[in-house]
Image (spheres, rainbow, N blue to C red):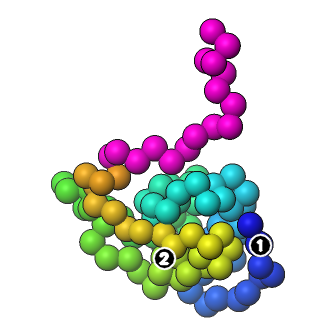
Amino acid sequence: MNVLPKQSNDNIPVKVERAIRLTVIWVKDLTDDWVSLKEQILNEVDNDTRKLFTKRDERTKEILELNAMELDIIKLWKQLTGVELKLRSFKERRDIRWWKPVVDFDEDE
């Protein structure tokens, strides 16, 4: 994984870029799902910053359209990890389990 030097991007606030670079440490290339990554980034920012991200439709749980910042985050993620993120439907996302810990603690039992 190649972490590129900081590049300024007017659409990505500094707080969000810091959260992205922190998230790269543990997510790496383990997922290509935009919503899974977005959830991890949102865990690293304050409530005011979360408001910059688009919301899902409450009824369908679908993301209708990404904003300019989110599109730039997807580009930055590809630069940092080589992974091209995909926007999947809610139905497709239900079956994704991207987090697979290296150690299986139940294995010895």
User: Between residues 88 and 35, which one lies in front from this camera angle?
Assistant: 88
Residue 30, position as x, y percentages in the image: 58, 54
Mark 1 or mark 2: whose residue is earlier in sequence: 1
* Tag of residue 70: 2
In the rendered view, would you say 44 is above or below 17? above
**Secondary structure that dominates the magenta span:** loop
Q: Secondary structure at mark 2?
A: helix
For the residues labelled 1 and 2, the Cα–Cα distance comes to 19 Å
Q: Residue at x 77, y 79 (%)?
A: 4
Q: Magenta stretch?
A: 94-109
Residue that numbered label 1 is attached to: 3
Residue drawn at x 58%, y 40% as measured from the top left: 100
- Seen from the viewer's position, the closer of residues 21 and 82 is 82
Residue 36, compared with residue 76, is above or below; it is above
Q: From the image, which quarter does the N terminus lie in? A: bottom right
- Residue placed most toward the observer, 62 or 108: 108
Q: Can the viewer see residue 18?
A: yes
**Left or right for 49, reference 66:** right
Q: Position of residue 97 (x, y in %)?
A: 46, 44
Q: Position of residue 77 (x, y in %)?
A: 60, 73
Residue 58 in the image, given as x and y percentages of width and height = 24, 56
- Was residue 59 drawn as part of the magenta stretch in this picture? no
Horizontal relation, residue 70 to residue 24: left or right: left
Type of residue at label 1?
Val
Q: Is residue 15 visible?
A: no
Three-letter code, disc 2: Glu
Vertical comparison of 79 with 30: above or below: below
Q: Residue at x 63, y 37 (%)?
A: 101
Dot 1: what SS?
loop
Q: Is residue 81 positioned above or below 7 on the image? A: above
**Looking at the image, which residue sits at the far left?**
59
57 to the left or right of 79:
left
